[in-house]
Image: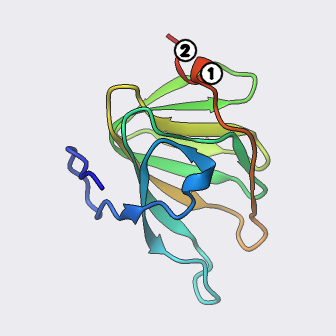
Amino acid sequence: MRNAPIDTVFNQGKPNPYGEFFTGKTYLTMLSEKDDVFNAPIGNVTFEPKARTHWHKHSGGQILLVLSGEGRYQEKGKDVQVVRKGDVIRIAPNVEHWHGAAPDSWMTHISVETNVPNNTTEWLSPVSDDEYCFS
């Protein structure tokens, strides 16, 4: 496990237990678990350079809060966006998308699942190198 050379508020966490749905190395710290009291899953996800999710969608949507570094975000059929510290990405329910770090930068974001408890994640195909390396 490598430590991110970027400063964030929350701990980097351990290797992501959902790693099978990512390309490259990522780390996860759950800040709020999905439970019967708050029902608000919130995770701090750290991506090593070039790491990214597979294509996926959330039935209830998702909000990403970029804390540090530089990353990439893309919705199916749209251009890849560069994301940086302070960016807020609001992903509507059932929108196919992916997100991850830039080729040469670590990136950390907070992932907030919305419209819980009916929010499920459907993991799809990996993001190809051609899709990822848009420039």
Towards the viewer: 115 or 81: 81
Q: Position of residue 45 (x, y in %)?
A: 43, 55
Residue at the extreme bottom: 37
Q: Which mark is residue 16?
A: none
From the image, tell me which residue sits under label 2. Answer: 134
From the image, tell me which residue sits under label 1. Answer: 131
Q: Position of residue 83 (x, y in %)?
A: 44, 31
Quarter of the image where one finds residue 128: top right
Q: Amino acid at mark 2?
A: Phe
Towards the viewer: 60 or 101: 101
Q: Residue at x 55, y 60 (%)?
A: 112
Separation (CA) of disc 2 from disc 1: 6 Å
Q: Position of residue 93 (x, y in %)?
A: 76, 50
**37 horizontally vs 5: left or right:** right
Whether 6 is drawn above or below 101: the answer is: below
Whether 114 is drawn above or below 6: the answer is: below
Q: Are marks 2 and 1 in contact (CB under 8 Å)?
A: yes
Few, some or many residues within 10 Å of mark 2 (<14, 14–19, 20+): few
Q: Residue at x 52, y 18 (%)?
A: 133
Few, some or many residues within 10 Å of mark 1 (<14, 14–19, 20+): few
Check disc 1 and report its element: helix, strand or loop: helix
Q: Amino acid at mark 1?
A: Glu
Check disc 2 and report its element: helix, strand or loop: loop
Quarter of the image where one finds residue 69: top left
